[in-house]
Image: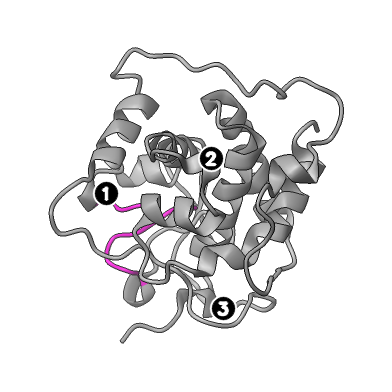
Amino acid sequence: MKLDFTRWLPAIATNPNRKTALSVVGVTALAGLALGPSAIAAPITSGPHEGAVAAIDKATGRDGATESGSATAGRGDKPSRAELIPYGVQGAQSRIPLDQAQRDNAKTIIEVAKKTGVGERGAVIGIATAIQESKLYNLGHLGAYNDHDSQGLFQQRPSTGWGSVEQITDPEYSSAAFFEALKRVHGWRNMPLTSAAQTVQVSAYPFHYAQWEEQSAEIVSQYWNS
């Protein structure tokens, strides 16, 4: 049984497209992460699911479509709590301290949320998912601690159709892939956060996303118009 990868902080390595990913080289202990198992996407043995295929087509421009940003992307006021958490939080909430790398990745997720048109609520779902999956670190391969071939902010898997290793460890690409898959979840805007995230991620721990909703909403509120 694999140990929870969030117990370790891999050293930073730079991949060919100049995006920073964390690899297993020079592992050191990581303090400050929430305790408990991390939600890592369960294996998908039947090949890429429809949402993943559509997401990659969209992220790579193969379908020729374009997306407008959120209706509120350019406004000056902060998103309201009703926009960020329309159904209230579910269960006890957790939070982690964020360093600059984590904040930068959160900002990238927010900017991609605007570009893909999922708006503030989508950004909250994306950040909560990335906190649970990777603690907002752009993880490279973790060797013995890796879950199959999962990598990047959202622990997406090349073998299930999410893209190449280089692509899924590009925060912009992985965020776009996540949001395009989310948009193909029927009724996602009306779902609890954990249900929407789980439908995309197919996690072995489907209820763990909910604990990050409050912190994710605070992050989106802080950076949406920055």
Quarter of the image with the N terminus is bottom left
Within 10 angstroms of label 3, few (less than 14), some, or many (20 or more) residues?
few
Considering every residue shown, the one lying at the far bottom of the view is 1
Q: Height in image: 194 above or below 76?
A: below
> Do the numbered discs 2 and 1 sit on residues whose CB atoms are within 8 Å?
no
Mark nearer the N terminus (3 vs 1): 3
Q: Give the residues drawn in magenta, as a range.
A: 146-158
Q: Is residue 11 visible?
A: no
Tag 3, which secondary structure?
A: strand
Q: Can residue 69 be seen in the rendering of this structure? A: yes
Which residue in the structure is indicated by mark 2? 189
Q: Is residue 214 above or below residue 226?
A: below
- Which residue, given by chain and number where applicable, does mark 3 sit on? 28
Which of the two discs, 3 and 1, sits closer to the camera? 1
Q: Which residue is mark 1?
A: 158
* Separation (CA) of disc 3 from disc 1: 26 Å
Question: Between 23 and 156, which is closer to the camera in this rendering?
Answer: 156
Question: Which residue is drawn at the image coordinates 39% and 28% (left, top)?
Answer: 59
